[in-house]
Amino acid sequence: MGGPKSATDRSGGRAPFAGLFGWALFDWATQPFYTLILTFIFAPYFATVVVGNPVEGQAQWGYLTAVAGLIVALSGPVLGAIADATGRRKPWIAGFSIVLMVGMSALWFALPGIAVFPLIAIAFIAATVAAEFAAIFTNAMMPQLVPARELGRLSGWGWALGYVGGLVSLVLMLAFVVADPQTQKTLLGLEPVFGLDQATHADDRFSGPFSAVWFGLFAIPFFLFTPDGGSARAASGAIKRGLRELWGTIRDIAHLPPIAIFLLARMLYSDGLAALFAFGGIYGAGLFGWRSFELGLFGISLTIAGALGAVAGGIADDRFGPKRVIVGALIGLLIGTLGIVSIDATRVLFVIDVTPEAEPNALFASVGERVYLCFALLIGVLAGPLQAASRSLLARLAPPDKMTQYFGLFAFSGKVTAFLAPLLIATATELATSQRAGVAVIILFFVAGLALMARLRAG
């Protein structure tokens, strides 16, 4: 499955290029799950067509996402402890990869109508948990692949490939699979491949098996060339040792208030950001009746904005410091989130009446759609700088001799409450019977994160 276990040792602490490229390409392989399924194609389809009611669909999607997040939060540290103690990670990643591909493929059976809900719920939860566990285990391999001074570059390389992978997969879906409802043609003016029938939403459902095939193809270099490091060891006592070390790190944080404040802030605002991306497409689909074609163009725009924002954010980080970048990004995200929840079919900014356009079939024809797109692009531009500056700030705050340990806790803090925002969104949506009320919950996470960052005296 993997390269020679001593590959990193023989290269002075650095894996061969093929191994590094295979590791980074794993982000490219998994990204369509997040881009096509969680955000821009399958999730809106599930909410508006499978469930059949945008409000109820948003609530149900929130509950499913919360269940998956809770499983990851409760099980991730335990599985990580076992993997650390036994020394091998690729066998675990292979197992999660199989579950991920099966779960994504099963989404093909999400025909319109709630009758398939149990099957799709199980498939979605299984795929989400498997994707998150695979990410935890592949991230844990980083210190074995490069020296500590190169961890940021390796991480950035994978992040960049993931961004591009999401964009390429979305473009391919629009170019060859998803048809404009008005013209019945794809973005390139072609008939959808394989004769996919829009009447049964085959183009939406195809995002599942497409993502599974994509993953299976592009994950191969990781398994062939990336060295696993370490040797197989008995798992006896692994859970106890791993949790003891985790508890020791958490106790140490009590003596480092800036890190404690920052990790708590990051836990809150990262939950809000993840929820915003997870529900932004569902909200737009329910609000404007967008289907996969419009949502795909929407996703391409946001991905390009995110890439440009990440570049600009890196420059701002070097010039002004990561704390200022994080605070500025959170203020901008608050404005963007307030902006999108201020829009409905007849109003923008809560009180400004807008008249529907005379050309309802044109893309993004209404004033509300255009204003929504502007606020969404603002969110897309700021997401990259927020995430990149967060990593940069921890690198400045953490003790140099415990850098890897604290980055492990950094990853854990981003997942431990990942279920909370979807759960609150689902509950608010259902209680208020309003998509707007559900999405508005995200504002609380950004406000809380911003309040904690304002107390931080560092960076």
Image (spheres, rainbow, N blue to C red):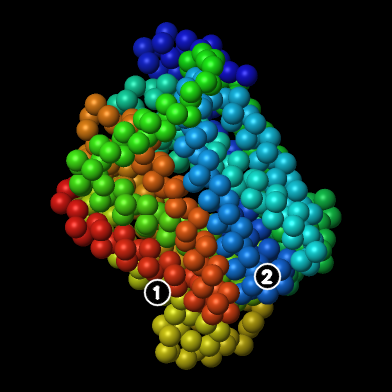
- Toward the viewer: 289 or 180? 289
Helix, strand or loop at mark 1: helix
Compared to residue 316, the image places residue 183 above or below, namely below
**Residue under the point 39% across and 46% down:** 413
Q: Position of residue 140 (x, y in %)?
A: 45, 30
Amino acid at pointer 2:
Thr
Q: Position of residue 263 (x, y in %)?
A: 31, 48
Give the residue number, with chain letter if any, for mark 2. Answer: 48
Give the residue number, with chain letter if any, for mark 1. Answer: 338
For mark 2, does the 10 Å Cα neighbourhood hold few (<14), some (14 to 19), or many (20 or more) residues? many
Q: Which mark is residue 406?
A: none
User: Quadrant where the N terminus lies?
Assistant: top right
Structural distance between the alpha carbons of marks 1 and 2 = 23 Å
Q: Is residue 7 visible?
A: yes
Is 198 displayed left or right of 428 in the figure? right
Amino acid at pointer 1:
Leu
**Residue under the point 66% across and 58% down:** 42
The tag earlier along the polypeptide, 1 or 2, is: 2
Q: Is residue 319 visible?
A: no
